[in-house]
Each structure stands twice: as C-alpha cells, then as structure tokens.
Image (cartoon, rainbow, N blue to C red):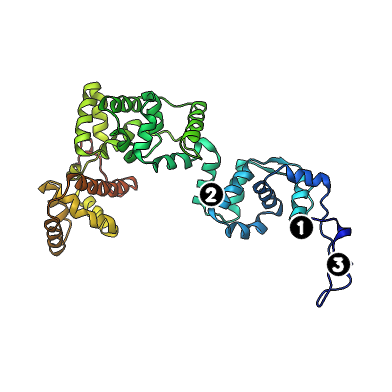
Amino acid sequence: MTDEASMPQASGPGVDDNSSSLPAPPVITEQAQALLNSITGKQKAAILMLAVGQEKSAAIFKSLHEDEIRDISVAMSQLGMVKADLVEAVLADFSRNFEVSDGIVGTYETTEEYLKRVGVPSDLVEKIMEDIRGPSGRSVWEKMANMPETALANYLRNEQPQTVAVILSYLPPAYVSRVLTQFSEDFAMDVIMRILHMSSVSRDVLESLENTLRRDLVSTFGRSTKRDSYAFVAEVFNNFDRKTETTLTEILGQRNHDDMEKVNKLKFTFDDIKRLMHEDMMRVMNAINKDPEAKAKLPLALKGSSKDIKKIFLDCMSKRAGGILDDEIANLGPVRMKDAESAQIYIISIIKDLSNDGEIDISPNSTDDELIE
C-alpha cells in the first residue's frame, strides 16, 4: 500500500469530487510492515478470521475448500497471544478498520470452538483438529496405510520387531495382514507376539517415531489411540488368506497357547457365520442387499464356502431369490481361492459393521449366553 498523500484522486462519472467524505485507506507504517513481513500469509488469514469475529467470518469459512480450512486452522491454533499492533497491521493490510486493545488469543481450544461456531461440520472439525494436534491426529497413519504394502514392508524389514509392532499397531488390520505376509514366518510371529504384549507407548517415544516416519515416508502425521491388542491381532488374522492364517495360528499356539486361544475367540471367519442366530442372519442379508458391492460379491464368497454356510444364506431368501443366487454361483465356473476369500472378507466386514453398531451378536455361543425357558 502507498501513503495517503501519494494516492491518486479518483475522478470521472459517478465519483464524488469531495474525496474527504470517503474513508481514507489505512496507512501501513514501516513498523507495521516489518510486523507483516514476519508472519506468513496463512497466519495473516488466521488473525483476520479471529479479529473480525465468528459471524462475519462464517460465510468465508463456508466458501473455503477443506485444505484451506485446515491450513488456516493450523495457523490459528499456533498463534498464541497476538499483540494488538500486529492485529492492526493485518487489518490495515486487508484494508479494514478495526481496533483492538488487548489483542487476541489463538489456541487449540479456541480454534476448535471457533470452527464449530462458524458452521464447519462437526466431523470435519474433528478431523482437522486431530491433524493439528500432531500425535493424536490421523493423517500420517492414513497415508501410510495407502502406501503399497511391499514398500512399507521393505522399509520395516531391518527394524527391530518391537519397533515394527508399534508402527503396525496404529494401522488398519487388513493392511497389517498384507504387510506381515511380506516377512518371514518367524519375523511375522515375533511382531505379532510383541503386539499382543505391548505396553503403552509414551507420548515422547511416539512423537519421536512419528517424526522419523514423517521424514522418511510421508509428509504429515498423527494418531495415538491405544487398541486392544488381542482384538487387533484377531482382525489381522481375519484378513489373512486361509493358508497364512492356519500357518501363523499354529506357530502362535506353539509360542503361547493362551495367546492363541484369546485371539481365536475374537476372530470371526466366514465359517463362523454358522453360529449366528437366524434373526441376525436376516439383518445381514438385508445389509448385503443394500450394498451393491456386497451383493455382487456374495456368489463368489459362497462359491468358496461349505454347503452348510450356503444353506444359511439361502434360508434367509425367498425361493425365487435363492434360485437366482444358485444360478449366479453356478455360472461363475472355476474361481481362484484367493478371489473367493477376498469376497468372503468383504462380507465379513459387513457383518462386523453390524456387530459394532449393536444390530447383531457375533460372539461365540457359551453356557453363559444360553437362554432359560
């Protein structure tokens, strides 16, 4: 911006010659310019949003892209105390008239509350704040899970099993199962044993690990949710192909029989469908019919299953629908076991979702669960 004295006077049709009636543009002093030069554009935007207030900035936030909201939110959360002279310099830079006496404060808490009040959807606010907070965010782990499993396996191959266990424990079980199949059976089992008996990872250690992974593998990071280790390993085993699952289950039993039993109790395979109540299977079929991909995969999944499992599904269908399913299975011809197992895993994921939502019960039958007439 230029000094007021050097500003050209507006003229022409529709312009009032009495320029003194128009507000003078703000003057940027050398000191103010020095302050502006000390911060980034994202920081300027964050200060501006906080300064103009929630109501006025709500419309701006609603028109921004998710990445832009995240960038401003990151800057906002890291501002701390912003002195009044810097606020005034930013406002002047945006040709605004705004006075503030004590400055403004940007923290994690004020940023989260601000985003909620200006109308950013709550799920997006949660995602943005998780990314901002670093170790408790998700972005880096998600990016790792999108890497080719061979690439991550090659990176981890020369690490200690304990380090590998910590890293894999924060990734999706289906992805972990594919990474583990890249290792030797002994190394994979060493990692599994350490996941099962892993103690809580301190924040300092996790932050150090995240910084290393951020530098070596991805650009942004986060997440520190502690999972139940046995449930996690059970999910990993669920996603193995049948041969790998059988082999590693046997090795786990040789290492620690109690661990194997605990994991087996938490596993849910396609054959475990036979322990579901008929009412629960009806809910499963309803969910499959609502999911086009699951409905398309069902014939392939049943192609590789036993007759008993196939009958359970047919019993939940009308005679006509069951006949159509029989024809679809027959028309598939020979299929690869790997493809059938992949389809079964997808159907299992539908069942697990219903279980997690409390709509069905997939726990094994036991004397404690027997009904008393």
- Across and down, in percent, residue 9 comes to 86, 67
| Image quarter (top left, top right, bottom left or bottom right) of the C terminus | top left
Q: Secondary structure at mark 2?
A: helix
Q: Secondary structure at mark 1?
A: loop
Whichever of callouts 3 and 2 sits on the residue coming sooner in the sequence is: 3
Whichever of callouts 1 and 2 sits on the residue coming sooner in the sequence is: 1
Which is more toward the observer, 352 or 189? 189
Using the rendered view, name the quadrant where residue 52 is placed: bottom right
Q: Which residue is mark 2?
A: 125
Mark number, residue 95: 1
Q: Which residue is mark 3?
A: 9
Task: Using residue 318 as the reference point, say whether residue 14 is left or right of it.
Answer: right
Distance (Cα) linking label 3 and label 2: 46 Å
Pointer 3 with pointer 2, Cβ within 8 A = no
Distance (Cα) linking label 3 and label 1: 17 Å
Whichever of callouts 3 and 1 sits on the residue coming sooner in the sequence is: 3
Please report the residue visible at 21 percent of the width from the left and 47 percent of the height from the top.
339
The residue type indicated by label 2 comes to: Val
Distance (Cα) linking label 1 and label 2: 29 Å
Mark number, residue 228: none
